[in-house]
Image (cartoon, helix red, strand yellow):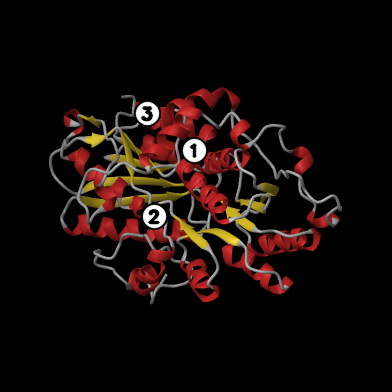
Amino acid sequence: MDMRPIRALLAGTAAAGLLLLTACTTDAPTEELPAAETSAAEEAPAESGAESEWFVQADYDRELAQRDIEPEGPADQPWLQAIEPEFVDTADLASDGGDKTLCFSNASVSNPWRVTGWITMQQQVEVLKEEGVIGEFRVSDAADDDNKQISDIQAFVEAGDCDAIIISPSTTATLTPAVEAACESGKPVIVFDRGVNTDCMVTFIHPIGGYAYGAVGAEFLVDNLEPGSTVLALRILPGVDVLEHRWAAADKVFSESDIDVVGVEFTGGDGAKIKDLVTQYLQRGEVDGIWMDAGDGAVAAVEAFEDAGQPYPVFVGEDEMSFMRKWDETGMTAIGNVYSNFQWRTPILAAQKIWAGEEVPSEWVLPQEPVDDADLAAFLDANADMPSLHYAKFGGEDLPGYPEAWTDR
């Protein structure tokens, strides 16, 4: 079985370049928005979501099926589990001795999910430093700038002393040549979180994926809303594979239902913009459900309903603590979607395995389980002392810095 369908999809879109989408609206209110807040709907491409070049039916079907597949690996270490793994031999990449130099090119720490994961990654590195596996952990942060990340990766390659290079790409197509150049250096390359248009890396690590994430939320809304109900979709940004897949999957689910999607808006994860957009839609009609492709700003959307004196919507948020606490406080019908934050541990442990010549999955698919109403109380209790911008499924409870490294961020 070909375990690289995501890579195949990305390769197929390489010629299209970076998809520079802007906000788009389906059946949007007829009244014009204030000039300063006008959506860029007229600039959006004619096809998006399930009609876009990002959507591949086979990959969608595979990810939805993987939600029901029992992962292989230790039950108490989901960051080491894998779904349908196909292993690659790394014996030729084995390296004797410890004190390795591990290099990491990070897209950014520009949102709470990435901050939480970055803390977890650093704590895992500390464990391997104590064990003498890692001598130096060299990090560059691109601050969401593709050109800077390309330069950062080039600098690692030119230095020549990285024993492995981990890359979390800023965007998909634009970073592909830089990842390929890193692979050509002969050093083991590990890509995680977001994909690129190549399979040259030793392993590509990610949770099940954006299709599964997007479908889970859309299915929840379809199951919990009456036919003909209205949904507002809030997206962060275009051009990133996992985010495009989330909306493509949701769009497909909605299109096959009786749900009316009244708007699809890009927010940049800005709470103030989210609140303003939701307020404007509420001024023009009812909104029965909110679908989000990430948890940033979820509470701001809820507050817009409160300020408008409107009933709480059926809500698709994320496992961010601020949202989960608001969910519990309001008693609204909701689900906490999950893009497993514990994945930030896996690249570090993958590097250790590669240096030891151990097999790793060529595509390392991690489990991805949402938080539902039955789980909510347990996760709130387990993370009671964590800050609002923390993510419940961070998987760092057994690391030596717990809990201070996350509470004192």
Quadrant showing the N terminus: top left
Horizontal relation, residue 15 to residue 68: left or right: right
Q: Earlier in the sequence, mark 3 or mark 2?
A: 3
Q: Amino acid at mark 1?
A: Ile
Measuring 53% from the left and 72% from the top, which residue is drawn there? Answer: 331
**Label 2, on which residue?**
341
**Label 1, on which residue?**
150
Horizontal relation, residue 352 to residue 275: left or right: left
**Camera-nearest residue between 364 and 226:** 226
* Crowd around label 2: few <14 · some 14–19 · many ≥20 (10 Å): many
Q: Residue 304's x, y, as percent?
A: 68, 68
Measuring 45% from the left and 37% from the top, which residue is drawn there? Answer: 195
Measuring 48% from the left and 48% from the top, which residue is drawn there? Answer: 216
Quadrant showing the C terminus: bottom left
Q: Amino acid at mark 3?
A: Arg
Cα distance in 3D space between marks 3 and 2: 22 Å
**Label 3, on which residue?**
4
Above/below status of 67 relative to 380: above
**Camera-nearest residue between 300 and 216:** 216
Closer to us: mark 3 or mark 1? 3
